[in-house]
Image (spheres, helix red, strand yellow):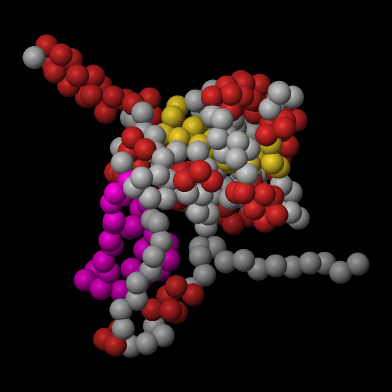
Amino acid sequence: MGLGYSKRPTPPPTRLRERIHEKPRLETRRELSYRILDSEEYLRLNGLTDILKDDEIEILEVPSTFPPENRPVIDATVGPLTKQQWDTNMPAAVAAVEEILHKEKGNVAIHAHSYRHQRALVANLSSQLKHRLIVHTAEDREEKLQEWMRSRGKVFVSVAFNEGQDWKYSICDAQILLKAPFADIGDRRVKRRLELGHRKWYLNQAMLEVIQAYGRAVRAEDDAARFYIVDGSCTELIRNTWEYIPDWFKAALPPSFKPSNLRSDETTQNSRSSKN
């Protein structure tokens, strides 16, 4: 019996650095389009600070022109849905999803994070909602996606559809983030990074995945969709990465997700305004 072997780099591969050196610097300008939360960390982990000077790097942030009221993030959190607390809090999460689905009659996408979470949710949802569900496997992902996109009033219970999707207008009226998308600490690369002290990277990657999922719907200024968050772990995730979250995303968040000091400041300002 043969033994399989794979070699995967940690930190990231050097391809990004190689691309920069494909042509002399004076002849070309490399532009990398990618959502980054912490630009300093991104540059350092990819080795770009070793080969480029400060005046050779420019970070551009483009604000959103989509009105925040058209793309609200709605706090529907229950307890944390971590591996340790999943069994305890899953019934409340199912109840929260059911409440949302009874309210949202249009097309809804649920981001389940993994097939294990997807199966658990589907198995426990009320039979009254089963006729709306479109559930994919690893084998029929694209087929089920297209079926949902052509439908109306259906619920796409998805895994790993938080990037590269264009769910505009009536394709998607609401999204539900069931589970915070933390990287699997059982993955050797993730484990190694945490051993190297890259805790901030771990949190930022999860927050980036949340923002990417959020951006699948509302694709134009006159588009609108709600984004519900069920996993209580997201509250601390958002607060712990607050300084790196883009302002356009913060503008859509309710006060319950904001760090305590900002909530206190808003309470004080509102109190002063009411007195005036």
Where is residue 143, by image quadrant? bottom right
In this view, the residue in front, 123 or 21, is 123
Residue ID at (34%, 76%): 30
Q: Is residue 132 visible?
A: yes
- Left or right: 34 as drawn, with respect to 28: right
Q: Magenta region: which residues?
A: 37-66
In this view, the residue in front, 264 or 64, is 64
Count up the numbered dots. 0
In this view, the residue in front, 26 or 198, is 26
Q: Is residue 250 visible?
A: no
Residue 227 % position (x, y): 47, 36
Q: Quadrant of the N terminus?
A: bottom right
Residue 168 % position (x, y): 47, 49
- Left or right: 255 as drawn, with respect to 149: left
- Left or right: 259 as drawn, with respect to 101: left
Where is residue 231, by image quadrant? top right
